[in-house]
């Protein structure tokens, strides 16, 4: 086996050394960029980048305008304006509280609307009953439907009373047996 010094003396070894140092010094290893060849593609690329940049700037401007409007109206959503990765636990807790308050307000509004509808229906029924008793032709059809409603209510109340009596009997029998 020959030593490295003996192998290093040949022509191929000299060429390898030369290429090695050229690579280390970055001589002739990089392809030169021909601008004239790629000018058209570069213009397209720059145009595309400018378009994207303009779109992002418009988005950002809209966000800023919306934040300014909220600030002038008095709705301070400064916690939501902070990026997600910068929000800490206190900000998230405040957001949750606001969401809960909003949901409760929506429920209250829904209940109020339901109550208003009920009142309207009751008012309409009363008007129908009073108007039907005034006119004789309408009284037959209206009294028939209202009497059936009354019958249903009586049956329902009777059933409830029967249930109460049965429960009372069960309690008495269980208390007397123990």
Image (cartoon, grey):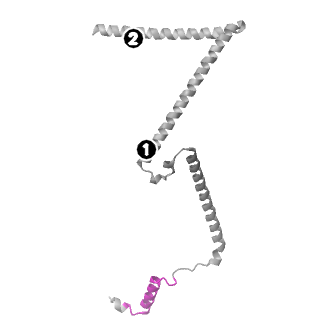
Quadrant into which the N terminus falls:
bottom left
Q: CA distance from mark 1 to mark 2?
A: 49 Å
Observer-side mark, 1 or 2, equals 1
The answer to whether residue 151 is above or below residue 77 is: above
Instruction: Name the secondary structure under disc 1.
Output: helix
Magenta stretch encompasses residue 172: no
Which badge, 1 or 2, comes first in the chain's sequence? 1
Q: Which residue occupies 57% across, 27% down? A: 113
Residue 122 x %, y %: 60, 17
Which residue corresponds to mark 1? 93
Residue at image location 49% in from the left, 34% down from the top: 104
Q: Main secondary structure of the magenta part?
A: helix
Residue 12, picture quadrant: bottom left
2 or 91, nearer to the observer: 91
> In screen coordinates, is 178 left or right of 152?
left
Q: Is residue 15 left or right of residue 36?
A: left
> Label 1: how many residues lie within 10 Å, few (<14), some (14-19) or many (20+)?
few
Bounds of the magenta span?
7-28
Q: Is residue 139 above or below residue 74?
A: above
Q: Looking at the figure, which quarter contains the C terminus?
A: top left
| Residue 17, quarter of the rendered image | bottom left
Which of 14/27 is in front?
27
Q: Secondary structure at mark 2?
A: helix
Quadrant in which residue 135 is drawn: top right
Give x and y (percent) for residue 171: 35, 10
Question: Circle 2 sits on which residue?
Answer: 167
Count of labels in the image: 2
Q: Position of residue 177 (x, y in %)?
A: 29, 8
């Amino acid at each position: 086996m020959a030593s490295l010094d003996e192998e290093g003396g040949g022509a191929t070894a000299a060429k390898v050394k030369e290429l090695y140092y050229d690579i280390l010094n970055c001589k002739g290893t990089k392809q030169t960029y021909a601008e004239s060849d790629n000018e058209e593609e570069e213009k397209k690329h720059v145009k595309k980048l400018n378009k994207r940049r303009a779109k992002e700037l418009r988005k950002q401007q809209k966000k800023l305008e919306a934040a300014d409007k909220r600030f002038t109206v008095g709705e301070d959503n400064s916690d939501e304006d902070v990026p997600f990765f910068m929000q800490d636990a206190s900000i998230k807790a405040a957001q949750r509280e606001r969401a809960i308050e909003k949901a409760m307000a929506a429920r209250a509004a829904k209940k109020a609307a339901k109550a208003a509808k009920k009142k309207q229906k009751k008012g309409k029924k009363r008007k129908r009953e009073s108007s039907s008793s005034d006119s004789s032709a309408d009284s037959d059809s209206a009294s028939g439907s209202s009497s059936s409603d009354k019958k249903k209510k009586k049956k329902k109340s009777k059933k409830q009373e029967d249930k109460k009596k049965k429960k009372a009997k069960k309690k008495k029998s269980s208390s007397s047996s123990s």
